[in-house]
Amino acid sequence: MSHPSPTPLSGFGLGLRIPHYDDFLETAQPVDFLEVISENFMVEGGKPLDVLAGIRERYPVALHGVSMNIGSSDGVDLDYLARLRRLADRFQPLWVSDHLCWTGVEGFNSHDLLPLPYTEEALDLVASNVHAVQDALGRPLVVENPSTYLAFPEAGMSEASFLTELCARTGCYLLLDVNNIYVSATNHGFDPDDWLRRLPLDRVLQIHLAGHSQGRDMLIDTHDSPVCDPVWALYARFAERLGDVAVMIERDDHIPPLADLLAELAHARSLAGDARSRAA
Amino acid sequence: MNLRERQHAFAVALGMGAVPEGVDAHGMAVYANNYRAQLRACLREAYGKTVLWLGDDAFDANASRYIDRHKPSSWTMDAYGEYFVQWLENAYPADAEVGELAWLDWHLRRAFSGPDAQPMEVHDLVADDWENVEIDFVPTLRFRPMLSNAVAIWRALADETPPPPVVIVDAGVGARVWRQGLSPRFASMTADEATCLDLALAGASFGEICAALGRTHDGEQTARIAGGCLGAWTAEGMIRGLRR
């Protein structure tokens, strides 16, 4: 079943976080959109939905989930999808996104973005799950690349090839987290530019920019610090090749004052402007 | 190993801190650490005042043992701490305030994003046949009997003032939690009010509530207590309507 394509947005936004609710509700902030964590608003009532209603009156909103579990061999949770559909129907987001991962199986939910073996079997399963998601939501899904810390011996394709084939089979779109590309490339020793070259760029609707931490053995996707220089550099090279995309800073922990994030966003705007000039 | 087997083995290993066949131990350690750290953070956030009361070390030790025993199953992390009140009650059987603080933490949090309801206004508190009227409460309302002054302790912790010493309170008193508008609320209840609320939530009519009070109070006292409860509950946004 095909679904209406999302309208691309060329602009710059932020992930909405609790410490900034009043900043966004009381003053028009210089962002083109906000992204909210879907599960935080898949609640029965109260302040979360009241806040989101106020936000939605003022800004375009994208829904970004962490529990869709599209890589689970159990299949997708139809009750979860029904709740997400109600949220999406009420707030009419730009699009709905989640991660290329599994979060649980057989009634267990890790609440983490667990890695998939990139095999034909997994591709068949994820494609089937994405079709089920898109039918349940009545809109295409936007799929984000996660940071990963291990690979599986049975994997026969790269993450980029897996995502490319997933787009071809399901009509889904892509949310590229440039930090996650950098983290995974460093951890697994692949070339992030080569990774990007393999992707169907016409399917990319959104970019995440974030920070990470140096763990004992590898980089850890903590999203708790400013975007680092290598990630900015990767984004700058990538921006030359992209069309209309929504670019945002995603901070999940150690949330700074909004002004700090707006300053990072201004840097992203500047890099994108430079990239357009070079490409022209 | 097919995908189902792979995911089963991975999930089992994750909970045990083990390494499944064929994967890098360093990478697996990152996932195992994330798993436990997220659940611990979830419990600390849900039980904020209990953390302050117990202290980080005691709370985290309980959280760690709870994580060992309780595998998350819901799509929402908000559900993960559902059994932690009972866990703490069992862990601190001689310290009633611990479980009671945890109960307040948990239900205030649930009330925050619980179902919406339009409360009844005080001027709508009229009925032709009070004897048979039943009370319909807002869906976020919860109550329990209390053995300690946990309500006062919770309030002091929230206000960042020195909490009072633990006091064992009179038998039968209670606490209630609900949401008024967008704000979660809580209050202590006398034994009489707790009796009235217990009966009302069980579906007793106003007449039956008064009859129960009449076993220990005279008519004037019964009318004052039952009417006082009804008026306070309405003024505080706890009542959605009257069923006749």
Image (spheres, coloured by chain):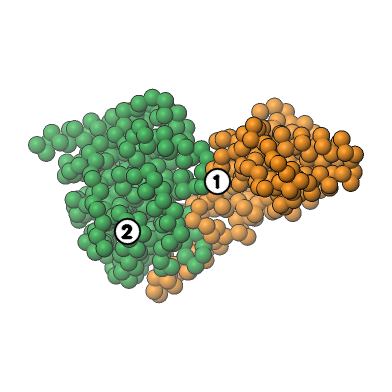
Label 1: how many residues lie within 10 Å, few (<14), some (14-19) or many (20+)? some
Quarter of the image for residue A117 reads bottom left
Task: Name the subunit of mark 1.
Answer: B
The residue positioned 21% from the left and 54% from the top of the image is A199
- Residue at the image position 55 percent from the left and 58 percent from the top: B72
Chain A's colour?
Answer: green
Decide: is A23 above or below B66: above
Name the residue carrying label 1: B115
Q: Position of residue A165 (x, y in %)?
A: 24, 62
Identify the mark at residue B67; answer none if there is no mark: none
In the rendered image of this protein, which colour is used for chain B? Answer: orange
Q: Residue at x 28, y 29 (%)?
A: A266
Q: Which residue is mark 2?
A: A134
Side of B102 relative to A278 (left or right): right
Q: Nearer the viewer, residue A90 or B46?
A: A90
Residue A38: x percent and y percent?
A: 42, 47
Looking at numbered disc 1 in the image, what kind of residue is underneath it? Pro
- CA distance separating discs 1 and 2: 28 Å
Question: In the figure, is residue A253 to the left or right of B82?
Answer: left
**In the rendered image, is residue B28 in sight?**
no
Please identify the quadrant where the N terminus of chain B is shown: bottom left
